[in-house]
Amino acid sequence: MAARQLLRAAPGRRGYSGAGAAEFLHRSIVPTMHYQKSLPRLPVPKLEDTITRYLNAQKPLLNDEQFRKTEELAHAFEKGIGRELHEQLVAQDNQNKHTSYITGPWFDMYLKAREPVLLNFNPFMSFNPDPKPEYNDQLIRATNMTVSAIRFMKTFRAGYLEPEVFHLNPEKSDTEIFKNIIRFVPSSISWFGAYMVNAYPLDMSQYFRLFNSTRLPKPNKDELYTDEKAKHLLVLRNGNFYVFDVIDRDGNMLKPSEIQAHLKYILSDNSPAPAFPLGYLTSENRDTWALLRKNLLDNGNEEALQKVDSALFCLSLDDFPIKDLVHLSHTMLHGDGANRWYDKSFSLIITKDGTAGINFEHSWGDGVAVLRFQNEVFKDSTTTPAISPQSQPASVDSSRAVQKLDFKLNDALKAGITKAKQTFDATVESLSLNMIQFQEGGKELLKQKKVSPDAVAQLAFQMAFLRQYDQTVATYESCSTAAFKHGRTETIRPASVHTKRCSEAFVKGLSKHSTEELQNLIMECSKYHGRLTKEAAMGQGFDRHLFSLRYLALAKGLALPEFYQDQAYARLNHNIISTSTLVSPAVQLGGFGPVVADGFGVGYQVQDDWIGCNVSSYPARNGKEYLQCIHKSLEDIFNVLKGKKIGG
């Protein structure tokens, strides 16, 4: 998952209109896509650098004999077929200056994947509650968030949304003076103007897919579908599908009181849950779902499916309150399957007690776009809510405005839904979600000690795995490359010779090391992790480069080079620990499923004075025990950094 936002721009802070029904969040004087044309291109790394970085990542995972074999294969690849493929990739990249070398292969990787999007790809991020408790009523929050989401869409489409910029020196670049100057700089060179004041505009090419978009299942390779003309919202409740227009013929948003009235009507509809809830089909294997979808279309459901696919987004209203954070994670990550449409670009989920979250389909885009949307919607819906607890719904005839979709199902479709539900139930039953909050320190203390908070979290994950399983395994940390045109993500490889050495000292050899020596080992890990992070954000990781060369070889019908047949290559790409972090004032927690059956999915946040971890696992791993080991590792690291002697 790529929700890590290494380069995080603060959302636009321009004044919001006080009027409840204002059409826009704000009006940026710098057009939304002002920097897009002049964004730098994602570099293709040098092949020798990629091979060096690859071997560095392999070192902690292999014994000496295995490493020698992998090293030989890597250098043979670098001098032979790898060199040819690299030169072809560079030539191809030079002919396609409108995009990045990873765009095509990465879309293909997602869209050709046949595994269900549920748990394998779709992550979730849950919103913090509204600070005003009385606004956390399901109807009030659903109305306010829907209105804010539409405002976001309209602001973006009008070109008024503040461009996404990572400010290294906000006193200079995040000012009205700078914006007033840069807006007159032609967009073909505007990026350079921002760069001069240490500001880095980010790619916003994914944003248009946030709305009116769905991933359509097709045999062998899915398609992304977007219909910006559609004006309706899709609402799911109790497994039933409803649609109503939220934009009128003139392109204006419906009054919030009317949206409130229609949502109230849906919430008070006591239709029973369908015997065969269609939502389960989106949790199926993609080829199975593609065949069933064709059957649905042939069976007279074209118009209803079109309404689902083209809707602005999916609003799922759940009929139960949230019990605790583990229940929250289960609800937002997968829910009950009947009240979800996992193929929508995103679903806004709101439970009975007003708890809200987003579950998003990953092929179209990454965490950067979704997090910006989430930040803006949270800020707008809590600071300038469209309706209040005292607001009355408009007196409109919702029974005419709201259409309940009816699906015609034959026996084959009913059987398909029944089987999808059985698979869904079994999969979800086998998924464990566990979490901890480490309360003994966070970002503030780590920065005082001059170590990277992210490096410490990653070191704790390595140390914990060694403590639990006595080994070092392939680890993935997602990093955004949105500083480049059509950048997606790159992999940081947190398992290194440094983390291995440090973990072994803490777990197996405490009595042999002084507190000062342990502090130095932590420092080494922090420095090296900082270097890896910087390289990845600058498009200088090795994973995407090697992935593209492999993709190119297969696309040209070549035999798969021996380098890629190495067991060590397969092991490195079997990410047992998959991690992703985000910190935002809007987000309470985030998470995703393990990417392999014997792995952990680790969503984490390092806050000022605490560290939170949300871990998913299947029966092959014990997530609860892993979290206890993470807690113990963090405790040891913090004690050492504070200069305390820890037990031998």
Image: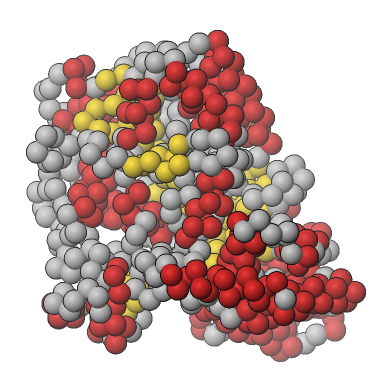
The residue sitting at 34% across, 28% down in the picture is 306
Between 289 and 572, the one nearer to me in the picture: 289
Which residue is depicted at the point 44% across and 15% down? 299
Indicate the quadrant containing the N terminus: top left, top right, bottom left or bottom right.
Answer: bottom right
Decide: is 517 above or below 119.
below
In this orientation, does residue 563 appear?
Answer: yes
Name the quadrant containing residue 460.
Answer: bottom right
- Which of the 4 image quarters holds residue 143? top left
**Closer-to-camera residue (294/610):** 294
Residue drawn at x 33%, y 62% is: 204
Q: How is the image coloured?
A: secondary structure
Q: Residue at x 24, y 51 (%)?
A: 152
Q: Measured from the top left, where is residue 218 in percent x and y?
A: 51, 35
Q: Nearer the viewer, residue 508 or 455?
A: 455
Residue 467 seen anywhere in this rendered image of the structure: no
Q: In this view, which residue lies farthest toward the right?
A: 65
Q: Is residue 294 left or right of residue 472?
A: left
Q: How many marks?
A: 0
Looking at the image, residue 298 sits to the left or right of residue 138; the answer is right
Residue 79, image x, y percentages: 72, 80
Q: As rendered, which of 6 and 298 lies closer to the eye? A: 298
Q: Is residue 163 left or right of residue 394?
A: right
x, y percentage for residue 131? 31, 51
Q: Give the x, y percent position of residue 169.
A: 32, 83
> Is the C terminus in the top left, top right, bottom left or bottom right quadrant?
bottom right
Which residue in the rendered view is the most extreme toward the top?
Answer: 411
Q: Is residue 540 left or right of residue 272?
A: right
On screen, residue 360 above or below 276: below
- Where, by quadrant of the figure, is residue 203 drawn? bottom left
Question: Height in image: 176 above or below 136?
Answer: below
